[in-house]
Amino acid sequence: MRKLSEKTNAPKLKPKSASRCVCLASALFCKKVDELLRTELRNLKISIDKEKLRRVAKKKGRKGRKGKKGRRGRKQKDLTPDRTLISLYEELVLADIIKKVKKTQLSDFLGEYSFLGTTLRQANIEPQPSLSDVRRLLTEYAILPLGKTF
């Protein structure tokens, strides 16, 4: 073992030459990384082109074929065969997945028409809907279709 006080015959590098070595090493490293990335990009482009050709070939080849009729898969198993619908519902209520909601009237949605919304829409800004907008949309898309007779 050497002692720290002993001198070695190895030449000491000056800071300038050390920085040159680091720059050269990083430049070589960057070149290698660049080459690898370019080859990867080339390979990806080739594989994408092959996929496109396969898709075109499949589309052309399908013209003469007839589709299979009545392709049936396996029936899915019932995961809860021994339980009733009521017991499953009770379990969901106990787990707080299904919650009882308060009864509300449509008149509970108080609010006026947003006159500012039209000016914002003219400036290509989508405004937040007002409560009257919510009431109108609920009436149009939720309540009126329920009363529709066929």
Image (cartoon, rainbow, N blue to C red):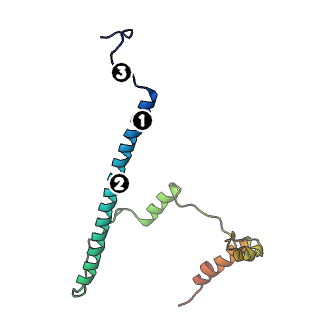
Quadrant housing residue 11: top left
Q: Residue at x 39, y 35 (%)?
A: 21
Secondary structure, mark 1, is helix
The local crowd at label 1, few if under 14, some if 14 to 19, many if 20 or more residues have their Cα within 10 Å, is few
* Residue 144 to residue 5: above or below: below
**Disc 1 target residue:** 20
Please identify the quadrant where the N terminus is shown.
top left
CA distance separating discs 3 and 2: 38 Å
Q: Would residue 47 be found to the left or right of residue 98 on screen?
A: left
Which of 66 and 148 lies nearest the eye of the viewer?
66
User: Residue 37, labelled with which disc?
Assistant: 2
Q: Nearer the viewer, mark 3 or mark 2?
A: 3
Sequence-wise first label, 3 or 2? 3
Residue drawn at x 70%, y 72% as measured from the top left: 105
Task: Report the Cα–Cα distance between label 3 and label 1.
Answer: 16 Å
Q: Which mark is residue 110?
A: none
Specify whether residue 18 is in view. Answer: yes
Residue at the farthest bottom position: 150
Looking at the rendered structure, the secondary structure element under dot 3 is: loop
Residue at point 51% right, 55% down? Answer: 94
Q: Is residue 69 visible?
A: no
Label 2's element? helix
Label 3, on which residue? 11
Amino acid beneath label 3:
Pro
Q: Quadrant of residue 4?
A: top left
Q: Amino acid at mark 1?
A: Arg
Q: Position of residue 140 (x, y in %)?
A: 63, 81
Residue 43, relative to residue 36: is it above or below? Answer: below
The residue closer to the viewer here, 54 or 145, is: 54
Between 83 and 15, the one nearer to me in the picture? 15
In the picture provided, is 95 more to the left or to the right than 143? Answer: left
Circle 2: residue type: Leu
